[in-house]
Amino acid sequence: MMTRAVHAFLLALRDLPSPRVIRILAQSLALTLLIFAAAGAAIFFGVRWALAHWRWLDGASLDMAGVLIALALVAGSWLLFRAVAIVVVGLFADAIVADVEGRHYPAAASRAIDVGWRQNIALALASLGRLIGGNLLALPLYIVLLVTSIGTPILALAVNALLLGRDLEAMVRARHPDRPRFDRPTRWSLGLLSAASFVVPVANLLAPILSAAMAVHLLHLSDGKPR
């Protein structure tokens, strides 16, 4: 199953030069970075204002708290970026899936159901909810495994691989509700490659689009070789 997922990933890489994919990538990336920066700034200044307003700390301690908040945001930036990226790409999901299907799997594209913006928003918010809920449940283990240095990143990768596999499957099956669900190894392979791509600097900017295209190929590869 991992071999099949890697094949789908390589096919997704070949989709990047498509003019429509590049346009969607530019739009989604600009919106993602804008929301990411705004969310980070809001969290930083919001928490700092709360500490000052409730007078828990004196001036020097408040400055130190601000530094610690900034460091915490940097440490959690991967999760925050992924959360924002999933929501934004969810808004563009139907356009991405339709483009890949139209070029590689025209027969499947002709049978697809149009997904409206309401359903796209619902899928994006459901993904965000699973992301927050899943990582909050795993938070105690993340903290315990900090002493191992590598345990926390490995667990975070595994947790988010499970979540991403589920989210990406829902994204592509929205247009094809009659198609069978991915089996667990396929969903795991899809999620693991997607979660890993979010970790790699620079590649994480392309990760949401690549993941969506990879999910499309995985859904239709069993029908035959892509055109």
Image (cartoon, rainbow, N blue to C red):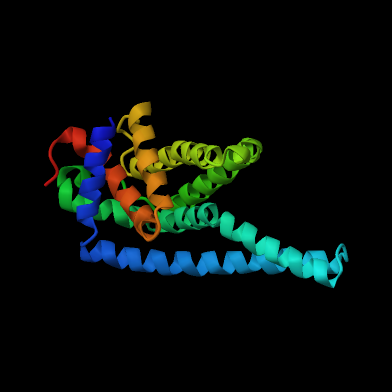
- Picture quarter with the N terminus: top left
**The one of 224 and 12 positioned closer to us in this rendering:** 12
Dividing the picture into quadrants, the one containing residue 80 is bottom right
Measuring from the top left, give residue 66's x and y in whole percent. Answer: 72, 66
Dividing the picture into quadrants, the one containing residue 171 is top left
**The one of 10 and 201 positioned closer to us in this rendering:** 201
> At x 65% / y 67%, what residue is drawn?
42
Determine whether, in the image, residue 159 is placed left or right of residue 182. right
Is residue 169 visible in the rendered image? The answer is no
Measuring from the top left, give residue 224's x and y in whole percent. Answer: 13, 36
* Depicted 183 relative to depicted 16: above or below: above
Determine whether, in the image, residue 98 is placed left or right of residue 49. left
Determine whether, in the image, residue 79 is placed left or right of residue 9. right
Measuring from the top left, give residue 128's x and y in whole percent. Answer: 53, 49
Dividing the picture into quadrants, the one containing residue 175 is top left
Is residue 206 visible in the rendered image? The answer is yes
> At x 45% / y 59%, what residue is drawn?
88
Count of marks, rendered view: 0
Measuring from the top left, give residue 31's x and y in whole percent. Answer: 45, 67
> At x 17% / y 34%, what residue is drawn?
223
**The one of 222 and 98 positioned closer to us in this rendering:** 222
> At x 65% / y 40%, what residue is drawn?
143
* Depicted 42 relative to depicted 103: above or below: below
Instruction: Farthest residue to the bottom: give it.
Output: 59
Instruction: Farthest residue to the front: give it.
Output: 148
